[in-house]
Image (cartoon, rainbow, N blue to C red):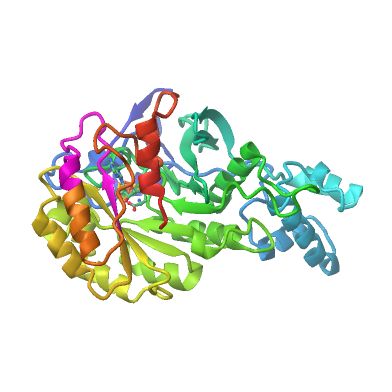
Amino acid sequence: MPTINVVVGTLPPSLVSYGGQVALPTLRIRFNILCELMTLSSSVAPLEKVPLETYVPPAKPSLIGLSRTEIADRLGEIGVASAQRKMRTQQLWHWMYVRGAKAFDEMTSISKEMRAQLEQHFTVDRPEVVAEQVSNDGTRKWLLRLPSGDGFQKAHEVECVYIPETDRGTLCVSSQVGCTLNCSFCHTGTQRLVRNLTAGEIVGQIMVARDRLNDWADRETPTGSRLVTNVVMMGMGEPLYNFDAVRDALLIVADNEGVGISRRRITLSTSGVVPNIIRTGDEIGVMLAISLHAVRDELRNELVPLNRKYPIAELLQACRDYPGSSNARRITFEYVMLKGINDSMDDAKLLVKLLKGIPAKINLIPFNPWPGTKYECSDWEQIEKFSEYIFNAGYSSPVRTPRGRDILAACGQLKSETEKLSVREREALRAMAMTD
Ligand code: SAH
Ligand code: SF4
């Protein structure tokens, strides 16, 4: 049977099934490379893409990523008596999220019969690690493979990066394969959106990091070695376009009877999905980072096309209204330094003016160039001048890289080759992943 690639816009709506395949009498049409092509004829970049591929759960589902209530329900479905479910759920929770058990067999406080029953129906699988890069200073990058929709689809892969420092270890986590949005300076933005990650796949990234770092609690280290102390949702994808899964995952990560990374040590970075910013404060309660990058709508429309939907004034109002922000819990504003585009002293002045009244810190990120980009990183002297102005206006404005050009990838930028991170790349990752 022939397989052809199609542009979704060319299919009649009745034949468009969400991210899957469409069976036609003689052709089986595969959605492969779609959404960026949708507006090839239009000169204005599309605001958003739609997921192309679907998540097909494995036959034996993993319990990772389910809430306590969901676990109890699953136990009910396999015949566990209701009087036992709460206790069994607590045991499972402890083994999964405090001890990091990779198989039911390890869960020795659960009866043998029960373990066998669990084994028959479920797993505690996390994403599969297909490549690991370890740098001299301990920075690690994992390429993770996730289940793809069917035999036709390419493997779904995301990256996760661990950045150790003297006082913390930060894990940069992905929320989507690709990204819904099309920021013009971001490599991920040029890629197609494949699908949202499930809550299990998001929590799974933290579990993989703890597995590889040997960071789980055991008899000798009952509270764990605490190598992964901070989480930043700054990998691939726009977390607020996958709100429910991100929320469910982060609530598990923050649960103090489990993974136990407090909300103050979790930062969610968004390009500005305004309606979900307040929900983030209300329903997740983590620290917020905003990818601002421009202080005028005209420019921001170009750099972050989502600005056409939620312009700067609306975005900043959502920040003013963000529940729980205070001088002790400041909102981070990320600002990528693009030569001759957004790095003038007028920009710096307007930035300070715009942020007035918001408990804020500003993270200046030297632009990381990628093949085919039209942008360049600002000169180092300009970055310093910009930073100094902001600092003198009373904002913390770290630029955590000694040089401003030829630096690596935003967290989550999938790299095709496995190679060691250079010193500059590590500095760049740190600059992006800083939470204070
Ligand atoms: N989608 C979310 C989180 C992932 S991106 C967001 O946009 O906030 C994490 C950070 O890296 C964002 O601030 C993003 O704007 C920045 N970034 C993306 N591409 C970059 C590049 N090429 N150079 C420097 N920073 C980049
Ligand atoms: Fe997506 Fe963030 Fe990249 Fe924009 S900067 S395309 S929102 S990952």
Q: Quadrant of the C terminus?
A: bottom left
Whole-percent x and y of residue 57?
A: 59, 44
Q: Position of residue 264 (x, y in %)?
A: 50, 64
Quadrant of the snapshot with the N terminus: top left
Q: Residue 387: which quarter of the image?
A: bottom left
Instruction: Please name the residue shown 81% across and 48% down the image.
Output: 219
Q: Can residue 289 be seen in this view?
A: yes
Residue 434 drawn at (x, y percent): 40, 51
Look at the picture and state if 191 lies above or below 334. above
Nearest the viewer among 267 and 356 is 356
Residue in view at x 29 percent, y 38 percent = 187
- Judging depth in this view, the residue of 392 and 192 nearest the camera is 392
Q: Which residue is drawn at 42% across and 71% down?
A: 328
Is 126 inside the magenta-drawn segment?
A: no
Residue 125 on image: x %, y %: 66, 42
336 sits left or right of 232 in the view: left
Front residue (pair 8, 216): 216
Q: Is residue 99 left or right of residue 3?
A: right
Q: Does the magenta stretch include residue 363?
A: yes
Foreground pick, 109 / 136? 136
* Image: magenta residue range: 362-383
Q: Would you place residue 392 above or below residue 65 in this image?
A: below
| Total marks in image | 0
Residue 10 is at least partly visible in this image? no
